[in-house]
Image: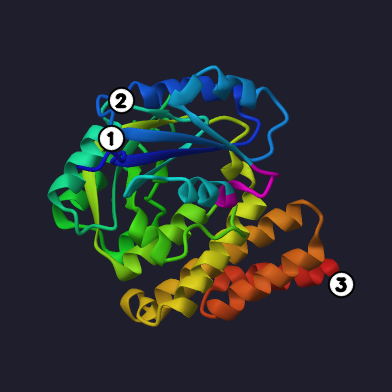
Amino acid sequence: MSNSPAVAVIIATYNRARYLRETIDSVLGQRFQNFQLIVVDDGSTDETREIVASYGPRVQFLHQKNHGPSAARNLGVLHAKADWLSFQDSDDLCLPNHLEVLFGHIDKHSDLAMVFANGDYIGGQVHGRDTLIPTTKSRRLAEKGIRFEDLFDKSIVRLQAALISKRCYDAVGGHDVELRISMDLDLAFRLFSRYPVAYIDEVVFSYRKHSGNSSGNQELRLSENIRVIEKLVTENADAERILGKRRVAARLAYRYYRLGKGRWRAGRRADAKWAIENAVSRCPWSLKYRVYQLGWSLLSS
């Protein structure tokens, strides 16, 4: 009988010492205890090393120069001794049922590449709702299954609520080290394109929304989202057929439009015009994008 853990929990962190202890405690407090816990320090300059050291052998510590969260997660996977991977952010919290719920499902459906669930917000409602995935949609996803459209139309996958097969993770190449914000969406697309994925209508983690969230970088978030979508249709020949060319074009155009507006407000007029031109080229039927293109051209002349 193998003595290997069932799950490797990997926390990639960078200068999050003020939240890290609470995150580690939430993992160690799981009802399901057959796991290995790895903290990967992505070049922190705060007290991260000392905090992790205080847990002794219960927590494995790895350190690298600052190469970003994707590279840190990949490093953690290299040291994982389990067949299943759980990625946690160093400012969020696992609920006590986290691994119990996810691994319980995997135990009955071992053919899956990934199973994921829902999360709530630390401190109460955000955007007028209690959970990251709205209640009605969460129920539908669990009852009817995940479609490509579900992943594409709204970024519903949070890896903090997921369990991933290490075999499948390695087969698709792990995290894209060039991405710092949209890496969860990119990985979900690649896994879903090749393997079965399931969803459970339960809340298994709590998301901490604060000013330091990497997703708060709107320029980077939009740029990476564009890159991930373009990567999807380039690498997956069926993606555009399943989703429809118009749906793909509309989402890309909207991202370019939002990118352009942000750049215009920042006074980067040439960059804004480039972005809105990309929006128009993808959705030439959109009057709104054409109006912005014309207006910005006139204001720049």
Q: Are marks 2 and 1 in contact (CB under 8 Å)?
A: yes
Q: Amino acid at mark 3?
A: Ser
Quadrant showing the N terminus: top left
Residue beneath the point at 57% across and 22% down: 53
Q: Which residues are magenta?
A: 64-71
Residue 37's spot in the image, x, y percent? 42, 33
Badge 2: residue crowd in 10 Å (few <14, some 14–19, many ≥20) = some
Badge 1: residue crowd in 10 Å (few <14, some 14–19, many ≥20) = many
Left or right of 249 in this view: 81 = left
According to the picture, the residue beneath numbered tag 1 turns out to be 99
Residue 121's spot in the image, x, y percent? 41, 29
Residue beneath the point at 52% across and 47% down: 73
Q: Earlier in the sequence, mark 2 or mark 1?
A: 2
Res. 123 in view: no
Q: Tell me how far mark 1 sits from mark 3, CA to CA.
A: 59 Å
Is residue 258 one of those drawn in magenta? no
Instruction: Please tell me the numbered disc located at residue 301.
Output: 3
In this view, the residue in front, 146 or 293, is 146
Judging from the image, what secondary structure is the residue with disc 3 in? loop
According to the picture, the residue beneath numbered tag 2 turns out to be 30
Q: Amino acid at mark 2?
A: Gln
Q: Tell me how far mark 3 sits from mark 2, CA to CA.
A: 61 Å
In this view, the residue in front, 1 or 133, is 1
